[in-house]
Image (cartoon, rainbow, N blue to C red):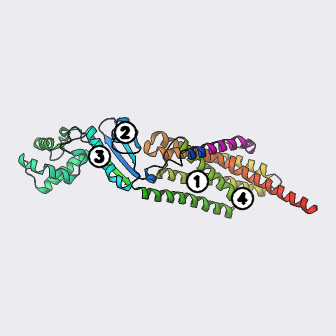
Amino acid sequence: MEIFKNTNFDFLGKKWPFIIASLVLTAAGLVSLLMKGGPRYGIDFNGGTSTSVAFATDPNEEEIRRVLSAKIPGEIVVQKIQGQNEVMIGSEVQDETQLNSAREAIYTGLAEKFNTDRTKMDINNSGQAAIADKVRDGLSRAGVNLSENQLQDLIKAILQFRDSRHGIIPSFDALTGVAGVTPAVIGVLKNELTAAPYNIRHFDLVGPKVGRELRTQALTATLLALAGMLLYVALRFEFVYGAAAVIAVFHDTIITIGLFSIFNKQIDLPVIAALLTLVGFSMNDTIVVFDRIRENLKLMRKESLYNIINASINQTLSRTILTSGLTLLTALSLFFFGGPVLHGFSFALVFGILVGTYSSIFIASPILVAWQEWSAARVSAAKVAGAK
């Protein structure tokens, strides 16, 4: 399938606006990184806590942030998951000894703000064994005689109902109809337990030492990917082709990281995954153009390299538009509808695809022309020197 046929655009003639744009974006990103002391790393790389909390009603992010900021030092990040009554709470803890206290502070802060009766165990944030121990004697006093297996089956059925409601039992009366739950059981549950309007879905801890190790490994993985691709392209084509491709990919990565700094976005493991994806995507796009250039060097021997490169870019234009365009649509869908968890990942993909597509045409290809002109000038200068 071809969108464009027999095009003859002078891409190399329009290279300077894109080169200038790249220089401006690169400079702006580097200045931002210098002013901010480097990228803004997320919890994955700095260490800290990550908590997912579901609420019975639409949560107030600013209110949650204010409550927790009073208990936990450092920045508190509260992001709502689009389309759900759920938030992701992140805290940056730089000391290993503070991780457990941060976890307790989050649990305590949420309980103080949203749990109306803290004297009772919360059924929405307790496990099966704890709930069974709490209600065992109460059920016996109420005349609900159950064997241990029956008691465990009852609590298990209640928790399955809770999980089917995103971890939240809105009221004990809502348990009517659950297997084994009678009015007497509901009465005991009301006396012994409370039902807070939230559920802590999961809680993750990342120590600063682990974060530093992940950061080093992510940088190493990126550099190794670039080195491997340089070697591959150099062996498949020539060294100058490999150098041009790696410069273009490095250019894409620097600009994308710079945009993260300019827009004050965190870099975490999903973002690193997106950057590595872009390295492969941009390199593949560049190799397609270079492969056509190599073919045309044999077919268009009388033409200048300038004309051969322009012809090659025109011949691969439909493929570039289709591949980049469809991938960009997918990334845009993730950006607008993927929620805050995927926002950094999709942000990197969207801008990386845009930058990577034009760098294959307006950055990598002009490097080949510049190299040929430099080599020709060098040979000419050597001949003049030899004649003298």
Q: Which residue is mark 1?
A: 279
Queried whether the magenta region covers residue 13, the answer comes back as: yes
Queried whether the magenta region covers residue 10, the answer comes back as: yes
Q: Is residue 178 left or right of residue 360?
A: left
Using the numbered discs, state the Cα–Cα distance from disc 2 to disc 1 in whole angstroms: 36 Å
Q: Amino acid at mark 3?
A: Tyr
Q: Which residues are drawn in magenta?
A: 1-28
Which mark is first along the chain, 4 or 1?
A: 4
Label 3 with label 4: CB-CB less than 8 Å: no
Q: Amino acid at mark 1?
A: Val
Residue at 66%, 41% (x, y): give it: 21
Quick one: 86 or 66, which is closer to the camera? 66
Q: Nearer the viewer, mark 3 or mark 4?
A: 3
Q: Which residue is mark 2?
A: 65
Q: Is residue 273 left or right of residue 22?
A: left
Residue at 74%, 45% (x, y): give it: 12
Q: From the viewer's perspective, is residue 62 above or below residue 48? A: above
Which mark is first along the chain, 1 or 2?
A: 2
Q: Which residue is mark 4?
A: 240
Q: Position of residue 3 (x, y in %)?
A: 65, 42
Which mark is first along the chain, 2 or 3?
A: 2
Q: Position of residue 183 (x, y in %)?
A: 11, 41
